[in-house]
Image: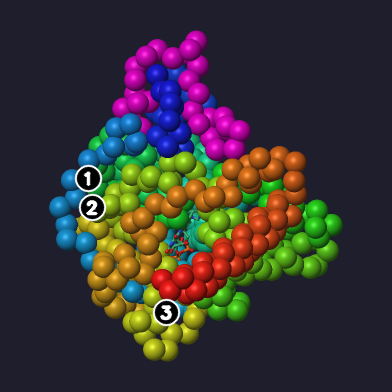
Amino acid sequence: MIRIKKKENCCGCEACKNICPKGAISFSPDEKGDLYPIASDDLCVNCNLCEKVCPIITPIVNHINYNPKAYAAWNNNVGERMKSTSGGVFPLLANIILENGGYVVGVQYEDDYTVSHTVISQNEELKKICKTKYVQSSNNGVYTQIKELLEDNKTVLYSGTPCQVAGLKSFLQKEYENLYTIELFCHGVINQIVFNRYLKSIEKHSKSKITSVEFRNKRNGWSKSATVVSLENGTEYCKSNEDEYLMGYLRYNLYIRPSCTDCKYKSFPRVADLSLGDLWGIEKLFDNHDNKGASAIIVNSEKGALLFKQIEKGLFIKEITIDFLKENNPSLVQSYRIGKYSEYFYRKFQKTDFIDLIQKIKYKDTVSSKDNNFMGKIMITKNYLLGK
Ligand SMILES: Cc1cc2nc3c(=O)[nH]c(=O)nc-3n(C[C@H](O)[C@H](O)[C@H](O)COP(=O)(O)OP(=O)(O)OC[C@H]3O[C@@H](n4cnc5c(N)ncnc54)[C@H](O)[C@@H]3O)c2cc1C
């Protein structure tokens, strides 16, 4: 029976819940809102399948024997690129699968902004699973659905974070020729409860209901992409670097899941056929990029290479090195530590408005760095006076 003793040892992929033949496993939030499995003593028959398919307890052994290749690339269709987060490579890959009667599995917002994986088979549905949602997606039983499709000889393209791909592979327990996988470069995931608090706070500040949420809108350029939340009263909450949710995520590292602080799936060989991320450092490669988005792609397997070949016509492509990606996009190989204000955040989180709380943290940080600068200057002056 699965029992999580150390939070770092559960990535929340839900492979255990999907595999349980007795439906004995449910996921519940802890005090921070991260979801963990709870197995029912009454229903559990001690088959231990849950532990066997856990990609952290039983890490998957990657037999991929392929020399990975890295590329800078972007979708030639500017409209499609603008509707994606990076260079719009994902929709091209998805289209190839859909056009050939296959299924694509990606992440959508539900009506109440719950973030979940879903299976699509029609091109018209693709829009809802494009673009990054910076929230840990609920698995929604898709591993089980994928297995059924694969057994039925359907082609499936699955896209998710590296640990979600690992969870899927562990769950399946065998290689399927008709399964293609994409992993995203990943900074870490944030739970739904934190996201909901942020949305509630926007509604409170704007005194209006949210009608849509979009991270990384590129209307002012990919390098200055903004969070745009549209409101029923016709206004917008639109912020770039100063979006409170992303500040808490990227600048102060307040709320990534504990397992993300020591991610087990950041090394090579990668777990998926293809890895997709942003092409940070683009200015070192190209003089005049249009700033409408660019992707970093790693082809990790023969299967990934075959799929990538099929979309080449739709892309601008330049081969680059994996070392370039490691240097310019540390999320590919590096886990991030929880920031120094995280404890403060969670202490106040239940009772304080989300936006106000992040602004308070920003203020505290500004004051403390000014103090540090001030102390630093005193030390330099003191050393100078002492002739050090
Ligand atoms: C939580 C998270 C953190 C990320 N961190 C980084 C990073 O640090 N550095 C970096 O270079 N890239 C990061 N990415 C990847 C990047 O944002 C783009 O998703 C990727 O480059 C693909 O972009 P695209 O333009 O090709 O396609 P897009 O059309 O933008 O496709 C986005 C893809 O991501 C999937 N997706 C969306 N939300 C989620 C989610 N919550 N969980 C799992 N899958 C999801 C969609 O289904 C789709 O497959 C992150 C993505 C996520 C979801």
Horizontal placement of 78 versus 275: left or right?
right
Q: Residue at x 50, y 74 (%)?
A: 385
Kindly identify which numbered label has been placed on residue 62.
1
Question: Given this view, does label 2 or label 3 mark the residue nearer the observer?
Answer: 2
Residue 107 image point, x, y percent: 51, 51
The crowd level at tag 2 (other Cα within 10 Å; few <14, some 14-19, many 20+) is: some
Q: Is residue 32 magenta?
A: yes
Q: Residue at x 24, y 47 (%)?
A: 177
Q: Which residues are magenta?
A: 27-54
Identify residue for label 2: 269
Q: Which residue is mark 3?
A: 76
Dot 1 amino acid type = Asn
Residue at (41% x, 71% y) in the render: 388
**Is residue 181 found left or right of 235 in the rendered image?**
left
- Is residue 11 left or right of 196 when viewed as pictured? left
Name the amino acid, label 2: Pro
Residue 333 found in image quarter: bottom left
**Could one spot residue 112 in this view of the protein?**
no
